[in-house]
Image (cartoon, rainbow, N blue to C red):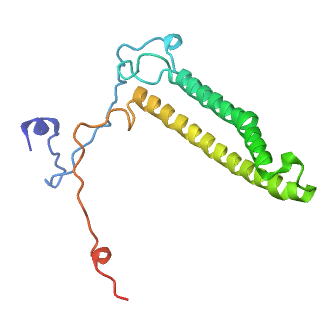
Amino acid sequence: MTARTLDRTEPEQTDETGTAAAPAHKPAVHKPVEKKNRRPAKARRPWKRLPSEKRGTGLPVVIWTVFIRLVVLIADYLLAYVTATVVIPMLGAWLHQQSGASQGALTSAGTIAMWLTPLLFLVLLMAAGVLVLMRGLWRWGTRMIQKVRDGRTGGPGAAPSRAPAPQTETRNKKNTRKRSK
């Protein structure tokens, strides 16, 4: 024991028989901890959770989120609008001309088989492609918002380390053995 702990301990008490009894314990008195530089209750701002040194400068995350989502929604709208008003009618006109339906040489069954069915198939493929692109744009927007959020809060993607950690290869003997057939 150190001298400091010896100073804090109380001397052992002996009872009538002369044997050492357990030291008497006094209940601990806790003093309230004073909080330094505490603002009055009405001046506190609960919506600002981060300390001032971690708070980013510039536009708030909410404004970036709204901006990125608006860009994605405008791009989605333009993609769908251009596909529906330009690409599909041009494709329909090209198929109409190539199928021979424009010369009136096809019957109604031939027009359906040579022009309408391929057009319907290509329109469905385009709709699926447009939906895939829209979903990709939405995910891109989500990743960009997460980057902004991490940059503001010092999250996992905020500051990449300069030297990547060395990767150790742990191989399981069962996985590296050749399997017999």
- Residue that lies at the very extreme toward the bottom in this rendered image: 181
- The tally of labels here is 0
Where in the figure is residue 79, as x and y percent of width and height?
A: 66, 34
**Is 83 on the left or on the right of 166, as rendered?**
right
Q: Is residue 161 left or right of residue 153?
A: left
Q: Residue furthest left?
A: 3
Q: Residue at x 51, y 14 (%)?
A: 41
Which corner quadrant of the image does residue 81 belong to?
Answer: top right
Tell me where residue 40 appears, x and y as whole percent. 47, 11
Q: Which is nearer the eye, 8 or 123?
A: 123
Image quarter where the C terminus lies is bottom left
In the displayed structure, 38 sits above or below 3; it is above
Q: Nearer the viewer, residue 90 or 158?
A: 90
**x 38%, y 18%: residue:** 52
Based on the displayed image, in which of its 4 quarters is residue 180 positioned? bottom left
Specify whether 18 is left or right of 84.
left
Q: Foreground: 2 or 94?
A: 94
Q: Position of residue 153 (x, y in %)?
A: 41, 29
Viewer-nearest residue: 72 or 88: 88
Residue 158 screen position, x and y as percent: 37, 32
Q: Is residue 59 left or right of residue 162?
A: right
Residue occupying image coordinates x 52% and y 21%: 47
Q: Quadrant of residue 33?
A: top left
In which quadrant is the N terminus drawn? Answer: top left
For residue 129, above or below residue 87: below
